[in-house]
Image (spheres, grey):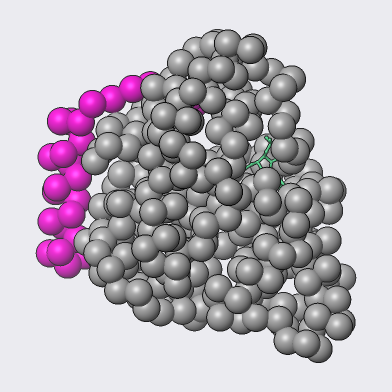
Amino acid sequence: LDEGYQKTYKSFDELLPTLPRVKGWWFDEHVQYQGFWLPCHCLRGSMLIHDHFNPRPSDIIVATSPKCGTTWLRALVFSIVNRNSYDFTNHPLRKANPQDLVIFLDAHIHGDGSTSFIDGFPSPRLLSTHLPYSLFPQRMTDDSSACRFVYICRDPKDVFVSKWHFANKLRSKELPPLTLEEAFDMFCQGASHYGPFWDHVLGYWKASLESPKKVLFLKYEDVKKQPWDCVRKVAEFIGVPFSQEEEEEGIVEEIVKLCSFENLRNQDVNKSESRSWVRPVNNSAFFRKGEVGDWVNHLTPQMVEKLDQITQVKFQGRLAD
Ligand code: A3P
């Protein structure tokens, strides 16, 4: 690889030992970098993106904090963009997990050690990331036509509960289970994947206000309530609005049905044990309950109060509507 890459690897190797660390929720330690706790391999991915990734105006980047609905949003974006290429009864989402249809940018670039695989991808590229907005280079965030981000956020109480269940599915059997209390303290302190959760959300939220053509900000709860409106909104944002004819044919409804929790969870591929190097966990782990408000079954009133208070202080009603 050329000198530019060698320089990035060297910076990463030099930087890594100097960063604050906490133990991860499953196998990886997290390091604190520019205000966010990142798994070590994602820091390398982030640095490689920063120095070498070439965005294209047609790139669509699905951005999320983990457990906010990444799998769902990937499925929706994939089926919106490719709606004329496949029959809904024999669709790629019936054979592959959404995570395999929209490439996980940070992990792929880290794994390959370069951007060459992604550079060779045909347009429009559907990419996905957990990185905070502030870690992307200016050539991606400043230039309003460089690429587009679709972000989804979720009630932190549901995010926390979802993450805790997920962590215990992923943890090695040699480790004791992660208790709800221990996980709760880590989450509140911001020490969770790509956390603090609230700062991650605010970064994209502010960008969506400053550059509404660059960043679309969605909420899991809204997509649950009005999935059809959200599908239309996403299509419009990425420049492929539904035509009158498509509306009459019920394409929006087909997409919503195809990507629904029940439908995706019941596909054989998503019941299976299949996993990949970028995703070392069974597909089924990404489909648990898929509901709004499951936190009532897990959190004590004190936990609810504490999380709501942090949210209130951090958001100050800014995301209320
Ligand atoms: P729960 O654990 O609350 O059920 P991510 O994809 O970001 O890892 O988020 C996983 C969460 O989204 C899980 O939440 C999962 O059940 C839910 N989910 C997955 N697919 C979904 C879908 N098609 N519709 C709604 N929620 C979905």
Viewer-nearest residue: 115 or 156: 156
The answer to whether residue 37 shows anywhere in this view is yes
The answer to whether residue 90 shows anywhere in this view is no
Q: Which residues are magenta?
A: 1-26
Q: Residue at x 46, y 44 (%)?
A: 318
Quadrant location of residue 201?
A: top left
Quadrant location of residue 282?
A: top right
Q: Position of residue 68 (x, y in %)?
A: 58, 43
Q: How many marks?
A: 0
Q: Residue at x 55, y 73 (%)?
A: 237
Q: Residue at x 76, y 51 (%)?
A: 225
Which quarter of the rendered picture does the N terminus lie within?
bottom left
> Residue 13 lies in magenta, yes or no?
yes
Q: Quick check: which quadrant has ligand 1?
A: top right
In the image: residue 148, left or right of residue 281: left
> Residue 16 lies in magenta, yes or no?
yes
